[in-house]
């Protein structure tokens, strides 16, 4: 069509053609942006079937074009809102339909690519039509007083932007929409409090009112409310200072607080426990509010009692093949392994051998038994001198290949195998009970002789490494329903790193540390830091007090060049809460069930013993979900030289993903093996790792 024919058209027809051209250009630009391609006038003209001059006539610049795409996106969002409101459905059905439609709009229109040129006022104008639905939502949540209309309008604009953004970013927009819908609706039956960015009350519902100000008749909107009017305590029962209360922490730090647990004791003495999530509400990085979500978990504390067994249930109905107490009383500790072999041969009448695991987890070493069994067997499936349950099937298959017809019976004690009994051509069941009793006997006898620990060493150890080994707890252990796996490499040298964990009535303690320096000095001084931790723990100190005790102990040694980096942590299984204090150490990593790895950042603190005698420590907290794993590690892992540079957090994340199972032991082994294989050079620094799997896989 030539210029004259266009000018000869009636004005309404020309305007209609212009609208069609503009719409076609905008649609073509949206497709290009969704595909991640740069906008080009030539490509847009071809895709919209118009001339390049038509593109420039409608959109003089790229920003004009982006604004055009943004306007089209908002018009589609407005239409989605109107369709939802016209249907007059029940609240949750209407909200789910709205979220789905807005996410679909975002899936079709690249809102993330144009958000920077879309004015917030334009979004708010569209969101204004949501006010009737927002008011219904506020009534469903029992919020009082009703939030101001201007605040509700801002929140509605945030909802629109969030849905459009999800549709633009997520590959599975339907799943993203459903997840976002639940994020909005799931908290509605819990305690809810809305604050402005300075911590002043906007609104709250009855459960939140009872948690924060029990017994008070009313509180005016606009009053500061970041701390409840009750006595506060941490999950282990220690006092919680006001500035460590989740609402105040979030307001002061400008960061979300997730999964914090606090006890509230009312003036009447009633004690209630709450899991508290605090989330900052932001638009364009500027907070406009804070929402606190309170879940009453008081009844969960009763779960602790479920671990107690009824009286008499732990008694034996049949005699045991080895009386551990009698064996320790009557048999010299150095001869106990031979006594176990004698009892085993009495039961099965064939040759039997007892193997323990080398301290670096690489070999099975014969401790006692027939010499025609190999003195050493490869066993690269152990974590230090212990075998994990999930590594036994592969080890069994390997031994069957090397020693056909040999029965392998693990010596189990609290979820890990301390060694193996190997016997020729007998059913394993005939030695199972003896192996269990022998494990307890070997563990106890190790405190009275060097024979057992000496057998776990393939070569000489230096004094620093010997100090280190004497400090370490079992490499594999159960903590409540969860499990922990830990290891330090190299086990025959260096000696500055340590880890520790223990389960008390008020929850589990987990720690990892790296003492400055190398050799015996680092090993010896590191042992002082561990002794200070254990003293604080047994004196019923809090995490913060334990850190301060270690700090003061190191300062008292008057060695300015010596310090310790550490992460001190607690795991409260009842509330699924992981709490930690980081003292200049690499931050823990949180591996989610979907494979994503997140760094658990926290308020920084100096290494223990460095500079400040009275430095202040503050815990951070995170509520863990099914499938989560927490990884603590030393810089001997992250700083391990590789061909590409350093092993780093990325190397740890890849190792976690490569683990054959999501258990603590499989994860720790995968990290350990990846670090060793990252370079042909020997490790020049201790490589320590501890993995907590609070909900181990079946």
Image (cartoon, rainbow, N blue to C red):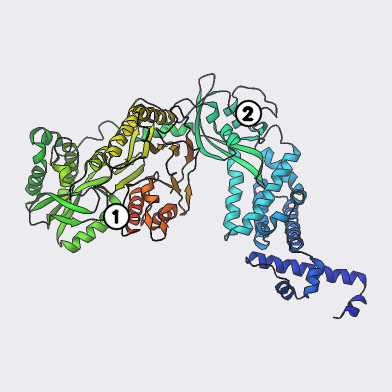
Q: Is residue 346 above or below residue 564?
A: below
Work out whether residue 358 or residue 98 is closer to the camera in this orientation and state it.
Answer: 358
* Separation of marks 2 and 1 at Cα, in angstroms: 56 Å
- From the top left corner, tell me how far across and down residue 104 is, in percent: 66, 59
Q: Picture quarter containing residue 559?
A: top left
Mark 2, residues whose alpha carbon is within 10 Å: few (<14), some, or many (≥20)? many
Numbered badge on residue 682: 1
Residue bearing mark 2: 225
Answer whether residue 3 is visible to the viewer in this image: yes
Q: Position of residue 231 (x, y in %)?
A: 52, 23
Extreme top residue here?
268
Q: Secondary structure at mark 1?
A: loop
The quadrant in which residue 440 appears is: top left
Q: Nearer the viewer, residue 580 or 53?
A: 53
Quadrant where the image shows the N terminus: bottom right
Instruction: Indicate the secondary structure of the residue bearing disc 2.
Output: loop
């Amino acid at each position: 069509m030539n210029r004259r024919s266009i000018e000869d058209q009636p004005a309404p027809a020309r305007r209609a053609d212009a609208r069609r051209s503009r719409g076609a250009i905008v649609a073509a630009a949206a497709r290009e942006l969704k595909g991640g391609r740069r906008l080009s006038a030539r490509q847009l003209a071809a895709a919209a079937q118009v001339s390049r001059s038509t593109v420039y006539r409608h959109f003089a610049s790229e920003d004009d074009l982006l604004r055009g795409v943004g306007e089209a996106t908002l018009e589609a969002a407005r239409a989605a809102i109107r369709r939802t409101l016209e249907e007059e459905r029940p609240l949750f059905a209407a909200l789910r339909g709205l979220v789905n439609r807005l996410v679909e709009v975002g899936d079709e229109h690249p809102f993330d690519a144009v958000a920077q040129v879309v004015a917030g006022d334009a979004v708010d104008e569209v969101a204004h039509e949501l006010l009737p639905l927002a008011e219904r939502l506020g009534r469903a949540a029992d919020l009082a007083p009703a939030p101001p209309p201007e605040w509700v309008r801002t929140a509605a604009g945030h909802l629109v932007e969030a849905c459009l953004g999800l549709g633009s970013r997520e590959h599975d927009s339907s799943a993203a929409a459903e997840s976002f819908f639940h994020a909005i609706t799931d908290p509605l039956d819990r305690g809810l409090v809305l604050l402005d960015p300075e911590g002043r009350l906007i609104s709250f519902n009855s459960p939140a009112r009872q948690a924060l100000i029990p017994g008070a008749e009313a509180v005016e909107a606009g009053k500061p409310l970041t701390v409840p009017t009750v006595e506060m305590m941490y999950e282990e029962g220690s006092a919680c200072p006001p500035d460590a209360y989740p609402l105040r922490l979030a307001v002061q730090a400008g960061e979300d607080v997730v999964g914090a647990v606090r006890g509230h004791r009312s003036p009447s003495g009633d004690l209630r426990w709450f899991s508290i999530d605090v989330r900052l509400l932001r638009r364009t990085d500027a907070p406009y509010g804070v929402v606190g979500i309170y879940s009453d978990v008081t009844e969960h504390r009763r779960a602790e009692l479920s671990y107690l067994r009824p009286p008499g249930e732990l008694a034996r109905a049949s005699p045991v093949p080895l009386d551990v107490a009698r064996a320790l009383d009557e048999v010299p500790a150095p001869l106990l392994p031979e006594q176990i072999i004698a009892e085993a041969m009495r039961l099965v009448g064939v040759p039997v051998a007892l193997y323990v695991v080398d301290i670096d987890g690489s070999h099975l070493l014969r401790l006692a038994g027939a010499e025609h069994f190999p003195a050493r067997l490869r066993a690269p499936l152990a974590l230090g001198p212990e075998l994990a349950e999930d590594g036994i099937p592969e080890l069994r298959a390997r031994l069957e290949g090397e020693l056909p017809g040999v029965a392998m019976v693990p010596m189990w004690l609290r979820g890990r195998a301390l060694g193996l009994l190997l016997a020729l051509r007998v059913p394993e069941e005939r030695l199972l009970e003896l192996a269990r009793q022998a494990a307890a006997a070997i563990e106890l006898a190790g405190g009275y002789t060097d024979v057992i620990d000496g057998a776990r060493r393939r070569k000489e150890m230096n004094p620093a490494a010997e100090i280190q080994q004497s400090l370490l707890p079992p490499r594999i252990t159960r903590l409540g329903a969860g499990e922990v796996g830990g290891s330090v490499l190299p086990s025959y040298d260096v000696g500055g790193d340590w880890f520790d964990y223990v389960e008390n009535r008020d929850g589990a303690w987990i720690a990892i540390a790296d003492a400055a320096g190398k050799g015996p000095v680092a090993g010896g001084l590191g042992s002082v830091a561990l002794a200070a931790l254990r003293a604080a723990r047994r004196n019923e100190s809090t995490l913060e007090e334990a850190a301060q005790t270690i700090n003061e102990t190191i300062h008292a040694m008057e060695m300015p060049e010596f310090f310790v980096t550490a992460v001190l942590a607690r795991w409260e299984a009842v509330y699924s809460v992981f709490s930690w204090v980081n003292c200049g150490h690499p931050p823990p990593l949180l591996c989610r069930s979907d494979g994503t790895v997140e760094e658990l950042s926290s308020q920084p603190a100096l290494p223990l013993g460095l500079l400040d005698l009275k430095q202040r420590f503050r815990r951070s907290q995170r509520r863990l979900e099914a499938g989560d794993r927490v990884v603590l590690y030393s810089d001997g892992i992250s700083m391990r030289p590789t061909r590409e540079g350093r092993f780093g957090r990325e190397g740890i994340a890849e190792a976690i993903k490569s683990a054959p199972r999501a258990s603590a032991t499989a994860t720790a082994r995968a990290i350990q093996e990846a670090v060793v294989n990252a370079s042909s050079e020997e490790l020049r620094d201790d490589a320590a790792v501890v993995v907590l799997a609070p909900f181990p896989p079946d």
